[in-house]
Image (cartoon, helix red, strand yellow):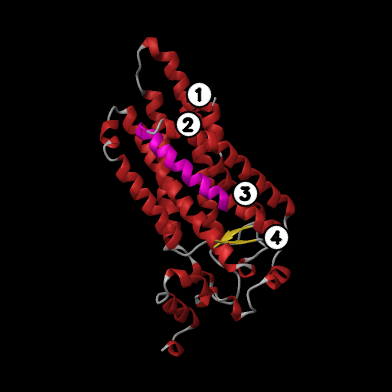
Amino acid sequence: FQMSLTPTEAVQTVSQWLPIWQWPSMPQYNCSRVRPAGMEWTVMNGQVHPIYGSWSMFWGLLCEILYVPCLYALYKERHHACYKIMLWLAAIDVIAISCNSIGFGYILMAGLVFCSSPWFVWIVGCVGLGMWCGACIGCLLLVTYRIFELMNMCHRFEAHTHLLIVFATCYALYFAFLTPPILSNSAVIAMFYDPFIGDIPTEVYVNWPHTVNNLLIVMTSASLYICLVVLLVTKQVSASSQRTYYVVRRIIFVQASLICVFNVAASLEYIYMNFFPTPQLLIELGHISWQISHGVPPFIYLTLNKTVRGHCK
């Protein structure tokens, strides 16, 4: 039957028959089509990047350390719906940082490609992708709650907080384990759909749900953050509370700007570079934006969030 198909059609057909634990051995990910998986791929195809690898590992470890007191503070405030979402997002970020910064840094320092260590690169890519998409939907929930809060309708949101967090968790797990991964490659210093192991067309590896997530969810979140800032600017408050409200407005504006800039930059860059030829500098900036988007929240909490800062002290 497969002899009557084109190579691309045959690969797509076989991939539909295999369970999730056999994905790395699917034909399009089978390194043995060229040479057996192992360190020979590192020598022939990899490239060691000690500086960028060291930066990635340093950034990841720094963010993980700073997240420890923040997780404690968010846990202490978990009776608030907003802090429940922030606590869930923090857990997602901690896992994501271990993949896109610490794991990725090790891959760069060791000069690995997919076929150097297929299962390790596969797990880093799967989990990193799932946590990115989980963070996207989590940010969408958080900004939606903030808007409901400004409109004095947060009670409607709070009644469904646990259900929404369960949905977001399922959303992240779906992308982690039921869609094609993004795979680290030390030669191109980023993660791509394509494992770069043969002559199979790149479109075979495309993760369309991830593309939809980056375009729809991230852009919706960015639009809602803009709406949030507009609501803050136009909201009328009493004269006695104007000073406090101005401080709160400024804090939320800074937080929204930081989240939006890095999330949008990472999402658009990763879509573009997986479909079109992209300068190496933009590829590296795209991955750094992804690293910062998961790592910047503890810096925001410790500098701008008085409640979190109080618990940490």
**Quarter of the image that includes the N terminus:** bottom left
* Residue position marked by numbered label 3 in the rendering: 285
Residue located at (44% from left, 47% from top): 136
Q: Main secondary structure of the magenta part?
A: helix
Upstream in sequence: badge 3 or badge 4: 4
Q: Check disc 1 and give the amino acid type.
A: Gly
* Residue position marked by numbered label 2 in the rendering: 73
Residue 199 percent coordinates (x, y): 58, 77
Q: How dense is the environment of label 4, judged by Cα within 10 Å: few (below 14), some, or many (20 and up)?
A: some
Residue 221 percent coordinates (x, y): 41, 42
Q: How dense is the environment of label 2, judged by Cα within 10 Å: few (below 14), some, or many (20 and up)?
A: many
Q: Check disc 2 and give the amino acid type.
A: Ala
Give the Cα separation between the discs numbered 2 and 1.
Answer: 8 Å
Give the Cα separation between the discs numbered 3 and 1.
Answer: 34 Å
Upstream in sequence: badge 4 or badge 1: 4
Q: Check disc 4 and give the amino acid type.
A: Ala
Residue 185 percent coordinates (x, y): 63, 62
Give the Cα separation between the discs numbered 2 and 4.
Answer: 36 Å
Magenta segment boundaries in residue numbering: 79-99
- Is any atom of residue 268 visible in this view? yes
Q: The residue tagged with tag 4: helix, strand or loop?
A: helix
Upstream in sequence: badge 3 or badge 2: 2
Residues under numbered marks 3 and 2 in contact, where contact means CB atoms less than 8 Å apart: no
Tell us which disc is closer to us: 3 or 4: 4
For this rendering, which residue is in front, 109 or 229?
109
Upstream in sequence: badge 3 or badge 1: 3
**Quarter of the image that includes the C terminus:** top right
Q: The residue tagged with tag 1: helix, strand or loop?
A: helix
* Residue position marked by numbered label 1 in the rendering: 310
Residues under numbered marks 3 and 4 in contact, where contact means CB atoms less than 8 Å apart: no
